[in-house]
Amino acid sequence: MPLKDIEARRAYDRERGKLPHRRAYDRNRPNKAERLAYVREWRASERGKAWELEFRRKYRATPKGKEVEQAAARKWYATPHGHAVRRAEGHARRAAGELTAEDVMRLLDEAGGRCVYCGREAPLEIEHILPVARGGTNAMSNLAAACRSCNSSKGAKTVDEWRKREAA
């Protein structure tokens, strides 16, 4: 770190020189276990939790914090479960009814990896039996696990309309 003021440079060097010694002291201090226990206990307290939430909120407001948070979200949404949850969140914004990530995961698990329409084993998506565009809701009774092929070909049709069109 080039500093033009010689006194500032010397002060910087003094502080920097203390850092390795401070780290060595922290590693070898006799009451390290007690200190760690105290820190764990403090972080578990209400005050510690509030401090951590505030710290994270402030960190997320920084450019680096935003970047780290967005990278973690991209990584999670790239997983099959993350993709399903993102699709469910999009549907939840457009349709009435409560739909949670747990509901989505339960529905996908119950399907056992097979599409409810064609029975093929494929990556599954959440599908509305009565489409949202036709007044369908996010109620669990209106949701099914379908493969991408069946879901996209069905589109905004009802199951009966779609099956007639598929048969023709």
Image (tube, rainbow, N blue to C red):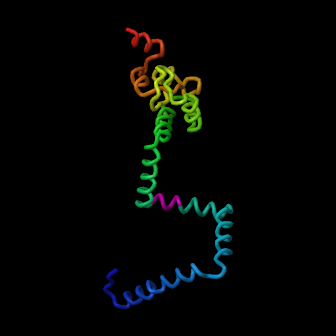
Q: Relative to 156, is 25 above or below?
A: below
Residue at the front extreme of this rendering: 121
In this rendering, does residue 135 appear at all? Answer: no
The magenta segment is: 56-61
In the image, 38 versus 114, the foreground residue is 114
- Give the side of residue 121 with respect to residue 5, left or right: right
Residue drawn at point x = 40 percent, y = 25 percent: 149
Q: Relative to 42, is 97 above or below?
A: above
Residue 161 image position (x, y, % from top left)? 44, 12
In this rendering, does residue 156 appear at all? Answer: yes
Residue 166 image position (x, y, % from top left)? 40, 13
Task: Name the image quarter holding the N terminus.
Answer: bottom left
Q: Relative to 59, is 32 above or below?
A: below
Residue drawn at point x = 58 percent, y = 62 percent: 52
**What type of secondary structure mainly makes up the magenta span?**
helix
Residue drawn at point x = 56 percent, y = 61 percent: 54
Residue 84 image position (x, y, % from top left)? 48, 36
Q: Is residue 72 magenta?
A: no
Where residue 30 sits, quadrant-wise, is bottom right
Task: Name the image quarter holding the C terminus.
Answer: top left
Q: How many marks?
A: 0
Residue 134 image position (x, y, % from top left)? 47, 19
Residue drawn at point x = 53 percent, y = 83 percent: 22
